[in-house]
Image (cartoon, rainbow, N blue to C red):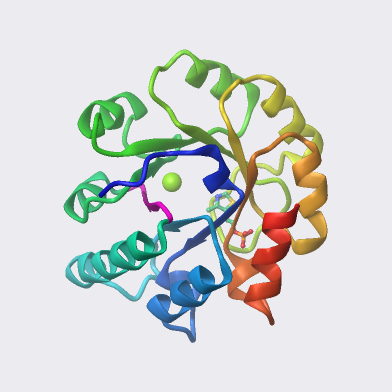
Amino acid sequence: MKIPFNQSQLKAYFVCGTQDLPAGDLITTVESAIQAGITAFQLRDKGPKSTLDKTSRLAVAGELRQLCQEAGIPFIVDDDVDLALAVQADGIHVGQSDEQIQAVLERVAGKLFVGYSCSNLAEIEKANQIAGIAYYGCGPIFPTGSKADADPVIGLAGLTKLVEATDRPIVAIGGITEADLSDVSATGAAGSAVISMITHSDDVARTVKKMKEA
Ligand code: TZP
Ligand code: MG
């Protein structure tokens, strides 16, 4: 059973891959985050620091897909349509430099919902013309150590401008800490997508609770 997109799923959105966990196990980390109440999970496993090859990534994705399904939260795959389709994910997340958004929308129509990264007004205005995008991921809001090729920081003011430029729900990403959650929420963003806030948390239950209360 697929979990249909709902914007409340963007509230406490956890993004992770093996490259984000130099000493940790991805499955265990996602289990703890699910236990703590995350509202969505995105598998973003890529780059030279990933510890998975294609075959093991498929196996891990299948396990994570199952865990999310049991918890009733959407399982979203970053930037890998073949993997997302192979494990029957709920969603696919696409960046500006990934496979063309139009081609992705056509390939996954009726199967996966689509999230799209937009980091400036021009990108969001162009994306607004394209039918079928479920949500936008916008950022980085603050400097981040989790993405080497991140776009320039847009800040809370930049995020506010993007929220005002679209009727689609926006999840904010990049450098967000627990102390920023209420400011992010005040922009009108539907939620925050985070890596290190959860992977570096000393109390994942408290962190996720704060995300959901923001
Ligand atoms: N896209 C824009 S910033 C970012 C991604 C994947 C990294 C977010 O990680 P963190 O640790 O929450 O800053
Ligand atoms: Mg990407």
Q: Position of residue 93 (x, y in %)?
A: 41, 43
**Residue 74: in magenta span:** yes
Q: 129 above or below 207?
A: above
Q: Which residues are magenta?
A: 73-79
Q: Quadrant of residue 189?
A: top right
- Quick one: 23 or 40, which is closer to the camera? 40
| Residue 49 visible to the viewer | no
Q: Residue furthest toward the top?
A: 129
Q: Which residue is at 75% across, 43% downward?
A: 185
- Quick one: 116 or 40, which is closer to the camera? 40
Q: Position of residue 55 (x, y in %)?
A: 17, 69
In the picture provided, is 183 more to the left or to the right than 97? right
Q: Position of residue 53 (x, y in %)?
A: 24, 70
Q: Which residue is at 61% across, 49% downward?
A: 11
Q: 162 above or below 146?
A: above
Q: Quadrant of residue 198?
A: bottom right
